[in-house]
Image: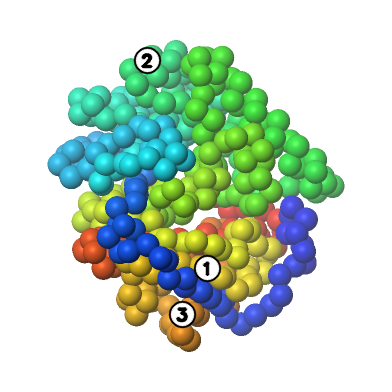
Amino acid sequence: MKTNFGRAPINISRTVIATFAFLVSTLSTAAFAAQGHAVILQYHHVSESTPSSTSVTPKRFAEHLDYISQHYTVLSLEKVITAMRNNETLPDNSLAITFDDGYRNILENAHPLLKHRGFPYTIFVNPALQGTRKNLLTWPELKRMSQEGVTIANHYLAHEHLLFKQQGKTDAQWLSDHESNILLAEEIIESYIGSSPRYFAYPYGEYNNAIQALLKKHNMIGFAQHSGAISAESDFTALPRFPASGVYSNLNTLKIKMASLAFPVIESSITEPALNAAGEVDAITLKIDLADIYPSQVACYYRGDTLPLAWEENTVSVSGPEQFPAGRSRINCTAPSKSQRPRYYWFSQPFFVPTESGEWPN
């Protein structure tokens, strides 16, 4: 069976085996701990009347911001990315705030709270949709917000599943269509706002290595929806962000995530998170810097359940599900920092699976 964008089938296996090959760095623990890390938060709605799964109430959002103002340095996404790309030092506990989809309640409920605290933030918008519905921000509103320091960035022309490919369309046509729509969205943002940072947030957080290569071709930075902190060693075509809405808005658990560090992955064998409808995946091999991590304290999870680990020298195998269901899944791994307790390193590997008919669930 093939995926709906033309990949060959993946060999069937009863267990997802994630193999982590750990490479001890020559850096000292202290030197490694001094490297820059940052966390990016992702919101959608700030409202009491929108879908709970993608919403945070204004009261709870204010609680988030109060805590952040006491413990974090909030930077614009541009400052974080520029520092990471240039290996420049970032303040400890650096954090960036983002919103997806460009809803009007961001202006009504979130913007005053953020502006009062002097916090910069980014909104990823769908240019073909903005202003077409009452609940979406208009271009004059977005322009005014940009003049007040808000960054407006690309969330695709419309909000579509990028991994969906219409029957009869070739892979080349599918990719060319996406290239045209991403670049057209950039042009529209630039025409209304005056500039665009060339940042792209994947709709639904879904991507594959072909779309990642497309972003790299056009010198664009990609933002996904799997969890984790970022560092200079992160994949800048699919940077993780911590969702902070719905069930993820609980401040007690969010505190742990905001304090997380980027898991020091040096090399990964998995560049393709998009699977076929069977939902099976080959082994994952990661090389990780162990300078600030005890291997015995690495723990991995799937849907809240702790996964069995099997170690052999510097290699750990993680037993996962026999197959991933249709939709979006991920395996998360964490480990406490030896030098910065109680902070945790956080790694997330997403997987995207279509239905048997080639559809992608919302």
Marker disc for residue 147: 2
SS for dot 1: strand
- Mark 3 lies on residue: 314
- Mark 1 lies on residue: 286
For marks 3 and 2, the one nearer the N-term is 2
- Residue at screen point 67% across, 31% down: 181
Give the image location of residue 225, x and y in percent: 47, 49
In the rendered view, tell whether residue 168 sits above or below residue 180. below
For marks 3 and 1, the one nearer the N-term is 1
Can residue 43 be spotted in the picture?
Answer: no
State how far apart marks 3 and 1 are (Cα).
11 Å
For marks 2 and 1, the one nearer the N-term is 2
Give the image location of residue 322, x and y in percent: 58, 78
Give the image location of residue 68, x and y in percent: 21, 42
Q: Which image quarter: residue 81?
A: top left
Give the image location of residue 102, x and y in percent: 44, 29
What amino acid does circle 1 point to? Leu
The reply to whether the C-beta atoms of the residues labelled 2 and 1 are less than 8 Å apart is: no
The front one of 22 and 103 is 22
What amino acid does circle 2 point to? Gln
Residue 183 appears left or right of 328: right
Q: Residues within 10 Å of mark 1 (few under 14, many from 20)?
A: many
Q: Which image quarter: residue 280?
A: bottom right
- Residue at screen point 34% across, 51% down: 35
The front one of 218 and 2 is 218
Can residue 131 be spotted in the picture?
Answer: yes
The front one of 169 and 282 is 282
Q: Residues within 10 Å of mark 2 (few under 14, many from 20)?
A: few
State how far apart marks 3 and 2 are (Cα).
51 Å
What amino acid does circle 3 point to? Asn
Marker disc for residue 188: none
